[in-house]
Amino acid sequence: MEGVRSTVIGTWSFSRHPVEEAGKLLNNHATSAIDAVEKGLNVAEENELYGPCIVGRGGPRNSAGFLELDAAIMSGKDLNLGAVTAIRGITRPVSVARKVMEESPHSMLTGEGATSFAVSKGFVIDQELMKSRESRAEDTKCEQSYVCTVHDTLGLLALDTSGNVCSGVTTSGKPNKHPGRVGDSALPGCGFYADSTAGASCCTGDGDEILKFCPSFLAVHYMKQGKSPEEACSQVIKDIVKKLSESSKSIEMAILALNIKGEHGASATFTEWKDPLTGDIYNGFPYTVWREGNQRVQTVLAKARD
């Protein structure tokens, strides 16, 4: 699409390197938003250092001691999507999700079925990821380092020069979750959504609460109605907080959005967050941005909305 500058944005300040990788790929105009999102998320999935971020192979185990991952990806061009939940033994779950989208008649696979599908598509089971926590003594100490006040999901949104958007997410889920537990991240409309007539969105936070509201779909819906990404995100948070206030409940979450003009925005319900990788404290929700023509990935701070 003439005049469109490719753009990538990611949840949290620790998304800098995944966003940077996605941006490098989009510098090559032959690369699609889907390619960029997948490869960007792979950066974190394959690196154990992202474990304290509740992402990838280094993430927290479930209550039975096993690592179960959720991931999803969606093409805004045709609304096709793929998702895997509670998948074990696979290093790059978002790449399996893409295979579900492109090479299966299904949209979501879970548990053993997701793992067997991955193997059928050439993915190799990492036996280290199949071990329980009891056989990995170092996990006990690592579990204590997880920052759980906000339940992190790594989400990337991308716009390519053809005007197509993509939303992708990956997470190891809530620490010490019950085996088979699935939060909002890999559920379409809840943790992610994309529609190239308007834009894309993704969420992060307490997935057991987020999935009740389909916020990512709502953000895209509001952008279709003409709201900017920031206005859309703010309206979603306002809607959710208002509903929860009726029963004196609260929620910890953040939402991110990108429209087809390359404009971006976010909103959150929390006022402070500590980066588990750097120790930096942010007074709001930090997200990262790469735009074609810029030399560096920037960090933007979205303040909490009432």
Image: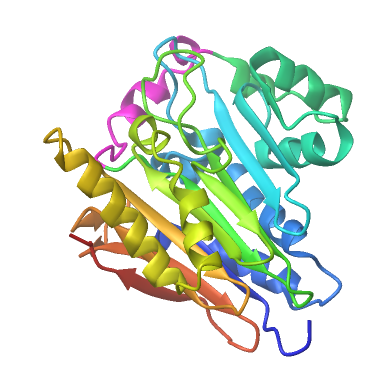
Name the spot of residue 157 as percent of width and height, x first.
58, 61
- x and y, in percent, of residue 141 in the image: 32, 27
In front of the other: 4 or 170: 4
Which quadrant of the figure contains the N terminus? bottom right
Residue 147's quadrant in the figure? top left
Magenta span has 120?
no
| Quadrant of the snapshot with the C terminus | bottom left
Res 211 visible: yes
Q: Is residue 291 above or below residue 206?
A: below
- Judge from the rendering whether residue 168 lies leftward or rightward of residue 75; answer left or right: left
Q: Is residue 47 visible?
A: no
Q: Nearer the viewer, residue 78 or 99?
A: 78
| Magenta-highlighted residues | 132-149
Q: Residue at x 58, y 78 (%)?
A: 262
Tell me: 195 left or right of 172. Answer: right
* Residue 124 appears left or right of 110: right
Judging from the image, the colouring scheme is: rainbow
Q: Is residue 117 above or below residue 166?
A: above
- Name the residue at 47% across, 34% down: 59
> In the visual, does 121 lie left or right of 64?
right
Q: Looking at this view, is 297 or 197 the one in front?
A: 197
Relative image position of residue 250 (x, y in whole percent):
19, 40
Residue 146 among magenta residues: yes
- Quadrant in which residue 120 is drawn: top right
Residue closest to the eye, 28 or 222: 222
